[in-house]
Image (cartoon, rainbow, N blue to C red):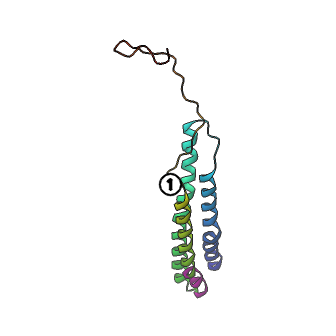
Amino acid sequence: MKRLGLGGVFFAWLYGVPFLLMVGLIRRVSAPYTPTYAEAKAFGATTDALLTTGLVLNAVLPVIGLLLAGLAGDERWRRHFAGAFGGVALIYVAVALVSGMATSALIGHVPADQEPAPQITQCIPISGGRGCPGG
């Protein structure tokens, strides 16, 4: 049972973290259909959640696995999780490189919305005798 649990933690880090980061990065560079600002903000918040979760789990899962393998006394899994710290560093370097190539921040970005600019329906004359702009 302990090997199943340790294997689950290891493979969650090995496959789950890159999946979350890839989905977050794909969403970050996509041009979604967001007709209103609220929808664009919600899309950006979901993308931020995916990227943040992937970055946090990248650091946390190998530490948890190493602690659990140490408590279980399983040397094989302890070596796997100790070697995973090299992968943690590689993932952070890859995300830093992608972030450096981006035109804006990876986290905290709100995509553009397709909401039309509001039309001016009434005009208040400007003081000083000038009329409304445009007639």
Crowdedness of circle 1 by 10 Å Cα count: few (<14), some, many (20+)?
A: few
> Can you give x and y, in whole percent of width and height, for residue 115 in the image?
58, 33
Q: Nearer the viewer, residue 121 or 35?
A: 121
Q: Farthest residue in the left direction?
A: 128
Question: Where 51 sits versus 86, above or below?
Answer: above
Helix, strand or loop status at disc 1: loop
Q: Is residue 128 left or right of residue 118?
A: left
Locate residue 124: give its quadrant: top left
Locate residue 37: give its quadrant: top right
> Can you give x and y, in whole percent of width and height, for residue 42 in the image?
56, 44
Q: Amino acid at mark 1?
A: Ala
> Can you give x and y, in whole percent of width and height, for residue 7 in the image?
64, 76
Q: Nearer the viewer, residue 92 or 12?
A: 92
Residue at (60% x, 70% y) in the render: 13
Locate residue 82: give its quadrant: bottom right
Q: Nearer the viewer, residue 9 or 52?
A: 52
- The quadrant in which the N terminus is found is bottom right
> Can you give x and y, in whole percent of width and height, for residue 58 in the image?
55, 68
* Total residue callouts: 1
Question: Where 91 sits versus 48, above or below?
Answer: below
Is 69 magenta? The answer is no
Residue at (64% x, 63% y) in the render: 19
The residue carrying mark 1 is 105
Magenta stretch bounds: 75-82
Q: Farthest residue in the top direction?
A: 129
